[in-house]
């Protein structure tokens, strides 16, 4: 069956059916789901009006030790399912390292529902996302820690 809109509960159930946690969060920024795979936390942020959403964005925060613009350009030129971009602190117009000298980068992947998607299609998208998280967790050129409120970006 094709879906133009999905609810947070429907997507949380799908994640749980795949064997992963799905914690629904509601706050002033909207609806989100916190999850994890390969031992790394990530989030899903929803676009649309509750309870029926028209798109989702899967997000994970990482820290790179090298030039963040070069790192994101390299990632984006070799990964077509996700996009990386540097997170800059409020008021900053250039990448700024944290106190450890690392740069915050968000990897994200979006899925639009308008026009119709099947739950099987979304399931496959989630599995590909989880493979991306696993790929990230195997890299030596980044640091991965628990996502620090990725729903606020």
Image (cartoon, helix red, strand yellow):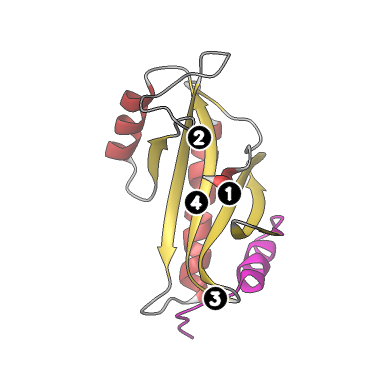
Disc 2: which residue: 136
The stretch in magenta equals 1-24
Q: Earlier in the sequence, mark 2 or mark 1?
A: 2
Q: Secondary structure at mark 1?
A: helix
Q: Position of residue 54 (x, y in %)?
A: 46, 72
Q: Residues within 10 Å of mark 4 (few under 14, many from 20)?
A: some
Secondary structure of the residue carrying numbered label 2: helix
In the drawing, what numbered circle is on residue 129? Answer: 4
The mark found on residue 151 in the picture is 1
| In this view, the mark in front (2 or 3) | 3
Q: Residue furthest left?
A: 77
Residue 87: percent from left, percent from top: 45, 34
Residue 152 on image: x %, y %:
57, 46
Q: Of label 1 and label 3, which has the lower sequence position? A: 3
Query: Could you tell me which residue is drawn at 37 percent across and 51 percent down?
Result: 81
Q: Residue at position x 39%, y 76% from top?
A: 114
Judge the density around disc 1: few (<14), some (14-19), many (≥20) Cα neighbours within 10 Å.
many
Give the left or right position of residue 139, taking residue 114 as reference: right
Q: Residue furthest front?
A: 91
133 left or right of 69 in image: right
Q: Earlier in the sequence, mark 1 or mark 4?
A: 4
CA distance for labels 4 and 3: 18 Å
Q: Foreground: 134 or 98?
A: 98
Between circles 4 and 3, the one closer to the viewer is 3
The numbered mark, 2 or 4, whose residue comes first in the sequence reads 4
Q: Which residue is mark 3?
A: 6
Crowding at label 3, few (<14), some or many (≥20) Cα neighbours within 10 Å?
A: many
- Disc 3 element: loop
Using the numbered discs, state the Cα–Cα distance from disc 1 to disc 4 in whole angstroms: 17 Å
| Residue under the image location 43 percent in, 73 percent down | 113
Judged left or right of residue 78, residue 133 is right
Q: Residue at x 52, y 47 (%)?
A: 59
């Amino acid at each position: 069956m094709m879906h133009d809109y999905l609810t947070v509960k429907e997507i949380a159930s799908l994640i749980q059916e795949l064997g992963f946690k799905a914690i629904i969060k509601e706050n002033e920024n909207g609806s989100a789901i916190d999850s994890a795979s390969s031992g790394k936390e990530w989030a899903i942020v929803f676009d649309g009006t509750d309870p029926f959403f028209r798109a989702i964005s899967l997000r994970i925060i990482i820290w790179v030790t090298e030039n963040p613009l070069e790192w994101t350009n390299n990632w984006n030129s070799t990964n077509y399912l996700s996009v990386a971009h540097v997170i800059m602190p409020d008021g900053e117009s250039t990448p700024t390292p944290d106190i450890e000298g690392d740069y915050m980068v968000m990897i994200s992947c979006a899925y639009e529902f308008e026009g119709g998607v099947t739950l099987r299609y979304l399931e496959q998208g989630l599995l590909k996302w989880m493979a991306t998280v696993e790929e990230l967790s195997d890299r030596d050129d980044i640091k991965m820690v628990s996502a620090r409120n990725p729903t606020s970006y």
